[in-house]
Image (cartoon, grey):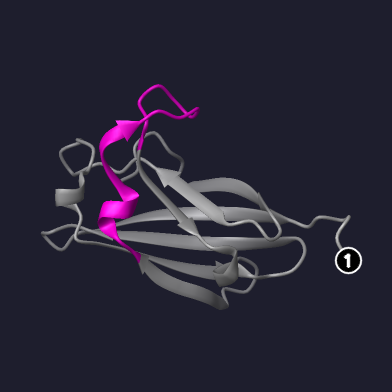
Amino acid sequence: MISNYPLVIEDSIIEGQDCTLQGRFESAAGTPLTQAGVTSVSYYVYNYEDSTAIANGSFVVASVIYDGLQQWSEDCTGYNFEATIPWAKLNEDGDFIYWIEVLLTTPGGETIPALYKIHQHALLSLP
């Protein structure tokens, strides 16, 4: 579950920029997940318009899950997940919309999804 979020998180990047995703994940009991509560984090990137697969991979849990909530501008509670997908994995030209699915797996085998709709904006000053 992603607390205090719409079902789909929308954000924007500039063409050529890495894509950083953030969120707050909670257990079924409503407490923020920690590194010990996550066994794996995988991601899948698709073309939003036609569902064509673009990239997939996984993150190191200790690198993307925080044991304490981090401050951010979304609310006063904070986030416990932050991961960056490098531009080299995205690499689509011009204005584009990515659909990104992040799947966290818990030690009990539960899969917790986070869905991101990322709008990429072209830099018109670039050739």
- Whether 83 is among the magenta residues is no
| Residue at horizontal 34 percent and vertical 37 percent from the top | 3
Tell me the kind of residue under disc 1. Answer: Pro
Up-down: is 57 above or below 22? below
From what the image shows, is residue 5 above or below residue 108?
above
Quarter occupied by residue 67? top left
Q: Is residue 74 magenta?
A: yes
- The residue carrying mark 1 is 127
Q: Which residues are magenta?
A: 59-79
Q: Is residue 58 left or right of residue 124?
A: left
Q: Residue furthest left?
A: 108
Of residues 71 and 74, the one drawn nearer to the viewer in this rendering: 71
Instruction: Give whichever of 5, 68 is nearer the camera.
Output: 68
Q: Residue at x 61, y 65 (%)?
A: 48
Identified at 68% across, 56% down, the residue is 120
How would you rate the neighbour count of disc 1 (Cα within 10 Å): few for under 14, some for 14-19, many for 20 or more?
few
Q: Position of residue 87 (x, y in %)?
A: 59, 64
Quadrant (top left/top right/bottom left/bottom right) for the C terminus: bottom right
- The answer to whether residue 47 is visible is no
* Residue 98 visible in the displayed image: yes
| Residue 114 placement, left or right of 65 | right
Residue 19 in percent (x, y) is at 55, 55
Q: Relative to 111, is 36 on the left or the right?
A: left
| Image coordinates for residue 80, horizontal then vertical, percent | 32, 40
Q: Secondary structure at mark 1?
A: loop
Percent x, y for residue 2?
35, 43
Rendered residue at 50%/46% (across/down): 9
- Number of marks: 1
